[in-house]
Image: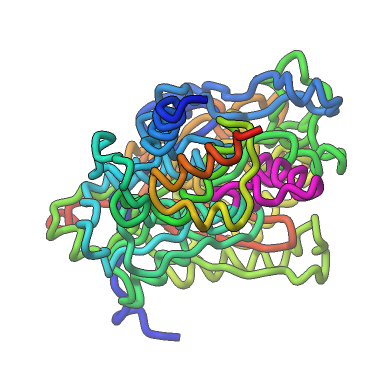
């Protein structure tokens, strides 16, 4: 392990988001603050006889999409995740105040890690029908870019001119948080100056169907979509499928200061691990020991102590496993008398799957910037398992203005994978202690 | 179908794929699709599909290889449209 001293410091200088309840960062801030739901009745899921007919799908207009894509690019473009990722990525780049590469030369210190689960299911379906009909020629030229996992990063690279590492990671619901940590490490180790990191996830039945089949989506709220996602609540009935994208520009501190960039916060460190389907872990259930280790390693690597943590932004999907996650936070951080604020954004955006980590990181960073804890919605009554180990006033249902110096955010994914990252409020260095 | 009509339709198909620094007025009969108009090879595939749809014809491998200039394309379409 390299010593902390020689690692570069890394800050966040740009953000973009396409979420079920807002399609840009300033609207997302307002939506999270007032607890605006982005969950709606989904006619397509109903037509296809899904049990869960509620989804969190971003509301993009044709006019809005046309600001980010040329008419030619839009021809036959069916990969919704690619659309979300490109919009969020371009917004984050612009927000950071970076300049697109000249035609002749790529930005050698700027790279991209935008992850996804699978890309362009709808496009893939179209391609499969053509291939099975013996008409492979009719696929056209965009089938590959729309259906390859790294399509979103490749597309953004072409738009922006990235000359450093350009890749897409994939680790289910950890994807966005994992991309963030991978980008952080790349800059910390001096291999890049800026990294556009985040993740995206398609909308629609082809990406959500498998979860409906596993009966882990709520079926009793089809007529009350905004109530369907109930993290922490004793009547949590499953996660609501969502989609969208989150993107952030991470930057080496000296570069950000030299550019006079707006700094949203500092990345202190992060941890990635897996439970290996051992102990209590399986393909779908987390190995609690590994979850706790991941949390502990993130804190240790960040050079802070458990007591310094002011806020936790959890994964908390609104299933029967919420209590287990809370107990892993309590044991992992050895919480006894002093409890950080704890929340989940899934009550209003649902579970955006591969995009969950990055969309929620944008929200968590907004909490840090505005020194506010955004409210948890739809808690009828705190689940008894949670109530027994965590003070209810620290799982707020109204916005809380409070000092947040250190925030930890984690994502836990299908396949027993974990990601946790520690963020610090940015104050002008002259005023920093 | 008159030659002029085919030319006009081809013009409309090709102009969609022009790079930003190439003007639709630059599309001439002897324009080479890739060298003069800067159309990339991936988009040639899409142009061929658009031509098939517009004229309700099927282009085979050799047709696509022969489609180098705008006038090549017109001739191929004319040949395919002959009863």
Tell me what residue is drawn at x 43 percent, y 34 percent: B10
Reply above or below: A106 against A424: below
Q: In which quadrant of the rendered view does residue A342 lie?
A: top right
Q: Position of residue A302 (x, y in %)?
A: 42, 68
Q: Does residue A224 appear left or right of residue A244 in this picture?
A: right
Which quadrant would residue A329 be assigned to in this image? Answer: bottom right
Who is closer to the viewer here, A202 or A12?
A202
Q: Would you say residue A186 sits in the magenta stretch?
A: no
Residue A121: percent from left, percent from top: 68, 44
Residue at (75% x, 50% y) in the render: A131
Please name whichever residue, A216 or A133, is drawn nearer the observer in this view of the structure: A133
Q: Which residues are magenta?
A: A117-143
Left or right of A186, for residue A175: right
Asked if residue A394 shows in the view, the reply is no
Residue A100 is at least partly visible in this image? yes
**A176 horizontally vs A183: left or right:** right
């Amino acid at each position: 392990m390299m010593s902390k001293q020689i690692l570069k410091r890394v800050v966040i200088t740009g953000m973009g988001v396409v979420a079920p309840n807002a399609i840009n960062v300033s609207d997302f801030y307002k939506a999270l603050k007032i607890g605006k739901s982005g969950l709606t009745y989904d006619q397509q899921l109903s037509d296809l006889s899904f049990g869960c007919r509620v989804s969190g799908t971003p509301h993009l207009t044709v006019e809005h999409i046309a600001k980010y894509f040329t008419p030619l690019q839009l021809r036959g473009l069916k990969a919704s995740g690619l659309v979300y990722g490109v919009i969020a990525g371009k917004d984050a780049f612009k927000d950071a105040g970076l300049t697109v590469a000249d035609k002749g030369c790529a930005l050698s210190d700027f790279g991209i890690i935008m992850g996804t689960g699978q890309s362009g299911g709808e496009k893939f379906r179209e391609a499969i029908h053509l291939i099975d009909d013996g008409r492979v020629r009719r696929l056209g030229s965009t089938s590959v870019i729309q259906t390859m996992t790294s399509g979103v990063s490749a597309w953004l690279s072409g738009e922006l001119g990235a000359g450093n590492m350009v890749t897409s990671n994939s680790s289910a619901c950890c994807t966005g948080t994992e991309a963030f940590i991978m980008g952080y490490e790349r800059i910390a180790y001096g291999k890049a100056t800026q990294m556009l990191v985040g993740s995206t996830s398609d909308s629609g039945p082809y990406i959500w169907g498998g979860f409906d089949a596993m009966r882990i989506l709520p079926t009793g709220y089809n007529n009350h979509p905004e109530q369907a996602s109930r993290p922490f609540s004793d009547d949590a009935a499953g996660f609501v499928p969502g989609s969208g994208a989150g993107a952030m520009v991470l930057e080496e501190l000296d570069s950000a200061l030299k550019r006079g960039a707006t700094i949203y916060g500092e990345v202190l460190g992060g941890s990635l691990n897996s439970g290996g389907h051992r102990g209590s872990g399986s393909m779908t259930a987390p190995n609690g020991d590994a979850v706790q280790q991941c949390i502990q390693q993130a804190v240790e690597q960040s050079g802070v102590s458990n007591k310094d943590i002011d806020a936790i932004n959890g994964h908390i999907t609104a299933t029967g496993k919420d209590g287990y996650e809370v107990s892993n936070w309590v044991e992992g951080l050895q919480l006894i008398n002093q409890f950080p604020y704890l929340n989940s954004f899934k009550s209003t955006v649902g579970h955006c799957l591969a995009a969950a980590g990055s969309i929620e990181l944008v929200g968590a960073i907004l909490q840090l910037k505005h020194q506010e804890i955004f409210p948890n919605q739809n808690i009828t009554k705190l689940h008894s398992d949670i109530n027994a180990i965590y003070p209810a006033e620290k799982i707020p249902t109204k916005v809380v203005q409070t000092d947040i110096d250190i925030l930890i955010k984690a994502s836990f994914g299908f396949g027993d994978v974990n990601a946790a990252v520690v963020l610090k409020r940015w104050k002008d260095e002259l005023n920093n202690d | 179908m008159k030659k002029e009509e085919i030319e006009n339709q081809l013009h409309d198909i090709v102009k969609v794929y022009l790079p930003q620094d190439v003007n639709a007025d630059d599309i001439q009969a002897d324009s080479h699709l890739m060298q003069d108009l800067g159309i990339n090879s991936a988009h040639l595939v899409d142009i061929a599909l658009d031509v098939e749809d517009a004229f309700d014809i099927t282009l085979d491998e050799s047709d696509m290889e022969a489609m180098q200039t705008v006038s090549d394309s017109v001739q191929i379409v004319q040949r395919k449209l002959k009863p």
